[in-house]
């Protein structure tokens, strides 16, 4: 991290996204938006999701990593997941990464999202409140969206709560990865990238092994096989995914978050 603040809030000026585990049944999201209307009534707000599994940091990181780069540089992303933070003395932070701003609790989300390397990180003023997302993160997000430099929100820091992403293991004829996310349809999204498959495979054929099952053919989309059959695809983020056509792969295959998946290449 460096100590030089660069203001990216030009193309994304005034744009704030919301990602929370607040759900859709209660008043929590409405209260969040009411506060935003009080702070900045003309601010453009985009809901990424409020359906993140409660306290599920890995789910939040997966959803945000899949979409944040589609927004203009300078967009401010509010992450209201497990927003009371980690440990007995919670904290909240704002970060600059890949030309975007992020505000979140110091609970490991920013470490995972940035692979431990934000361009800049500041501590936000702490507050005793039942809703840190509304009372701590939103004011910081509004300030950033209105062009306030990051280093004016709080002191620059170099430490945050550390969590590590699962690493893919690359061998000459094999890649070992894990399920990084189970989506709404029960599809299993792995941390194995198209880049890794191409780098190890060099055009060779391969089979994907998961549990006791094997799929030996890559398809362009989940409906490219008959209903009920297992299918392997690369999604729009170029992650290797396992699914069952018109079925829930997680339930039917007995695989879940962190389950091991192997790609084994033909040995010539």
Image (cartoon, rainbow, N blue to C red):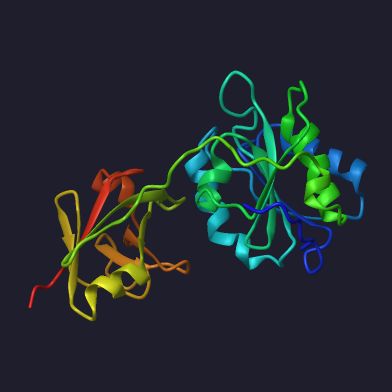
Q: Is residue 132 visible?
A: yes
124 is higher (above) or lower (below) than 235: above
Give the residue furthest to the left: 268
Give the residue furthest to the front: 3
Give the residue furthest to the bottom: 203
The residue drawn where x is 31% and y is 55% is 168
Left or right: 252, with 216 as reference point: right
The residue drawn where x is 29% and y is 65% is 232
173 is higher (above) or lower (below) than 34: below
Which of these two is toward me, 230 or 136?
136
Residue 80 at what x, y percent from top left?
Answer: 66, 39
The residue drawn where x is 79% and y is 47% is 151
Which of these two is toward me, 18 or 243?
18
Left or right: 49, with 217 as reference point: right
The residue drawn where x is 90% and y is 43% is 39
Give the residue furthest to the top: 88
């Amino acid at each position: 991290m460096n100590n030089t603040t660069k203001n990216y809030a030009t193309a994304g000026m005034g744009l704030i996204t919301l990602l929370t585990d607040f759900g859709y049944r209660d008043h929590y999201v409405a209260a969040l938006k009411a506060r935003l209307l009080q702070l900045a009534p003309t601010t453009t707000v985009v809901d990424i999701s409020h359906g993140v599994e409660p306290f599920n940091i890995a789910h939040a990181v997966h959803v945000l990593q899949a979409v944040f780069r589609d927004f203009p540089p300078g967009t401010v992303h509010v992450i209201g997941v497990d927003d009371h933070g980690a440990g007995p003395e919670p904290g909240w932070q704002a970060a600059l990464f890949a030309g975007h701003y992020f505000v979140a609790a110091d609970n490991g989300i920013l470490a995972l999202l940035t692979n431990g390397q934000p361009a800049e990180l500041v501590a936000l003023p702490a507050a005793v409140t039942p809703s840190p997302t509304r009372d701590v993160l939103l004011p910081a997000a509004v300030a950033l969206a209105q062009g306030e430099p990051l280093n004016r929100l709080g002191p620059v820091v170099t430490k945050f709560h550390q969590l590590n992403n699962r690493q893919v293991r690359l061998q000459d004829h094999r890649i070992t990865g894990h399920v990084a996310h189970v989506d709404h349809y029960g599809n299993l999204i792995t941390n194995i990238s198209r880049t890794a498959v191409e780098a190890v495979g060099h055009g060779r054929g391969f089979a994907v092994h998961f549990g006791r099952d094997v799929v030996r053919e890559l398809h362009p989309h989940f409906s490219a096989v008959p209903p009920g059959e297992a299918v392997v695809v690369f999604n729009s983020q170029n992650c290797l995914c396992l699914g069952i056509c018109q079925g829930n792969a997680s339930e039917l295959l007995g695989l879940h978050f962190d389950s091991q998946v192997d790609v084994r290449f033909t040995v010539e």
